[in-house]
Image (tube, rainbow, N blue to C red):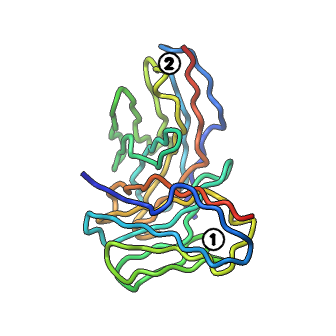
Amino acid sequence: DVKVTQSSRYLVKRTGEKVFLECVQDMDHENMFWYRQDPGLGLRLIYFSYDVKMKEKGDIPEGYSVSREKKERFSLILESASTNQTSMYLCASILTGGQPQHFGDGTRLSIL
Amino acid sequence: GDSVTQMEGPVTLSEEAFLTINCTYTATGYPSLFWYVQYPGEGLQLLLKATKADDKGSNKGFEATYRKETTSFHLEKGSVQVSDSAVYFCALSDLNTGFQKLVFGTGTRLLVSP
C-alpha cells in the first residue's frame, strides 16, 4: 500500500529557529508537494518537486525553502521561523498527472 | 486562474440523513475532479474522483457527478453515519495550467450526531 511518512506529528519551535520538516514516500513517485492547511483557507501549496534536485514555487513560498536530494525524501525548511508559520503542514506525492495525490498524516507546527 | 468553491460549514446532520456538499469550479482546461476526506488527526485521503464530463465517482456510499454545464461536482450520500464526521475537500487538477498540482476548496466540516 502507498505510504507517505512525515517525521513528526507535533512540533514546537521558537521564533527565529531554523526548522526542518521531513517527508518520505515509498512509492517511487516522481512528484512531491508541501502544503499548509489553515482554517478557512483550505490547503495552499508551498513548493513542489518534480524530480530529484528540481523544485518549483507554489502559491505561498515566502519564508520557506525545500530540498530534494533523493527521490523518496522531500524536506521543507523554515529558514527563520515566525509565529505566522504556525500551521498544519501536509506532504503529498503523486506518480503522474491526473492521478490522486497521496498524503501524509501531517505535522502540526507551533512557533512560539 | 483555476479555483474551487465549496459551501461553508459546518454541516450538522443526524445519523441516516441525506448529505449534499456543494462544489463548483472554475478552470480553463478540462480538469479532473476529486473529493478528499480528512478524519480527525489524519491527513487527506482520496474519497472519489471523476476525470471527464458526466462521469460519476463513487466510494463508501458517497457519489459525485462531473457536470460540465454547471461546472459542479457536488458530493452526496443517502444515509450518513457518525463515522462520516470529517472535513471534506473538493479539488481539481488541470494539466493545462499547473502540472500535477491540485487546487483545493476551503473544506466543509461535517458533523453527524447519533
**Helix, strand or loop status at disc 1:** loop
What residue type is disc 1 on? Ile
The kind of secondary structure element at disc 2 is: loop
Q: Which percent across, then down, holds residue B75? A: 47, 33
Label 2 marks a residue whose chain is: B
Which of B89 and B7 lies nearest the eye of the viewer?
B89
For disc 2, the neighbor class at 10 Å (few under 14, some 14 to 19, many from 20) is few
Q: What's the mark number on residue B18?
A: 2
Nearer the observer, B65 or B12:
B12
Q: Quadrant of residue A46?
A: bottom right
| Placement of the C terminus of chain A among the 4 image quadrants | bottom right
Vertical relation: B70 (above or below) A94: above
Which one is in front, B4 or B61? B61
Q: Nearer the viewer, residue B49 or B67?
A: B49
Is A67 drawn above or below residue B46 in the view shown? below
Dot 2 amino acid type = Phe
Q: Residues within 10 Å of mark 1 (few under 14, many from 20)?
A: few
Depth-wise, is mark 1 or mark 2 nearer the camera?
Answer: 1
In the figure, B106 relative to B19: above or below?
below
- Residue designated by label 1: A60
Residue A90, x across and y down, in percent: 51, 59
